[in-house]
Every structure is written in C-alpha cells, then in structure tokens.
C-alpha cells in the first residue's frame, strides 16, 4: 500500500528515511488507520500490505512496533519541551512544517520539492538551536 506512494512522493520518502518507522511499520499502521471505521478483518488487512505473504501474527507485531515508535516520538517531544530542550515556539514551528506539507501535496517539480525539504530542514535546525549546514546533498 505504501510502496506506490513512496515511489511517487519524494517528500514522503525523505520523511520516512528520517523517521523512526520502518517501511513495513508505516505500511501496516496506515492500513490499520484507514480501515479503523470499516469492518475489515485481519486477513484482509494483511492482504493490503505491500508484502502480501505476511502472517496475521507478523501484521499485529509490526502494528504494535509502529504504535510504540509513534508513542515514543510523541513522548520524546513532550519530554524535550518539559526539560526546555526545545527552542521557544518549537510547537509553532512544527505546525508551520505541517502547513507547508499540506501546501506541498500534489507538487511534482523536483526543484520545488527540494525547496520544501530544505525549508523543513531549516525549521528543524532552528528548533534544535543549530545553524543549518550548507552544501550537503539531500537526495544523493
């Protein structure tokens, strides 16, 4: 389910590579979220995975891992804020990234997508209190 989107969406690939999710975890979690209000049994959910021959147990285990990773990421942000490790207005900057990503949906120009990713990197470096290093390659 996620593989075609990864092939078509440069930003999604970039974000996944830097996240705590594996591709299988993201694939499984998205299937679970998309089917949450539908009556889709576990066998059909496993059939929706990119890797079709996954067992029900493996699907459930991967889903649990994805949930744990997401929960830990949220707790990490909360802990960082609590300890003052994040710069002031960090949450506002995260919302700025969210809005930027919403506006970037459907953009296909590699130059525009590269620009969006560079803006995201700059915002993240600002949140971390670091200056962005120039001259690094984003996709190579």
Image (cartoon, helix red, strand yellow):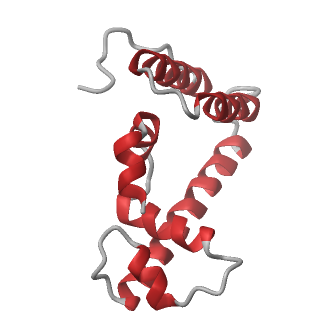
Q: Height in image: 129 above or below 63?
A: above
Percent of width and height locating residue 137? 29, 19
Q: Quadrant of residue 128?
A: top right
Q: Is residue 68 visible?
A: no
Q: Residue at x 38, y 47 (%)?
A: 6
Percent of width and height locating residue 110? 39, 21
Q: Is residue 58 left or right of residue 130?
A: left
Percent of width and height locating residue 14? 40, 37
Q: Height in image: 86 above or below 16?
A: above
Q: Nearer the viewer, residue 91 or 36?
A: 36
Q: Is residue 42 visible?
A: yes
Q: Residue at x 31, y 77 (%)?
A: 52
Which image quarter is the N terminus in? bottom left
Q: Is residue 135 left or right of residue 73?
A: left
Q: Is residue 59 left or right of residue 129?
A: left
Q: Quadrant of residue 75?
A: bottom right
Q: Nearer the viewer, residue 38 or 131?
A: 38
Q: Nearer the viewer, residue 37 or 16?
A: 37
Which image quarter is the C terminus in? top left
Q: Nearer the viewer, residue 90 or 37?
A: 37
Q: Height in image: 44 above or below 87?
A: below
Q: Residue at x 39, y 13 (%)?
A: 133
């Amino acid at each position: 389910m996620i593989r075609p989107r990864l092939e078509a969406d440069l930003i999604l690939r970039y974000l996944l590579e830097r996240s705590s999710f594996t591709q299988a975890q993201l694939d499984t979690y998205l299937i679970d979220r998309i089917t949450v209000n539908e009556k889709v049994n576990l066998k059909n959910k496993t059939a929706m995975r990119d890797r079709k021959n996954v067992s029900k147990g493996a699907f459930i285990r991967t889903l649990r891992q994805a949930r744990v990773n997401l929960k830990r990421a949220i707790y990490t942000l909360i802990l960082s804020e609590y300890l003052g490790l994040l710069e002031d207005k960090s949450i506002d900057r995260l919302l700025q990234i969210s809005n930027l990503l919403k506006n970037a949906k459907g953009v296909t120009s590699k130059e525009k997508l590269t620009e969006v990713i560079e803006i995201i990197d700059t915002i993240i470096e600002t949140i971390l209190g670091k200056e962005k290093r120039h001259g690094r390659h984003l996709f190579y």
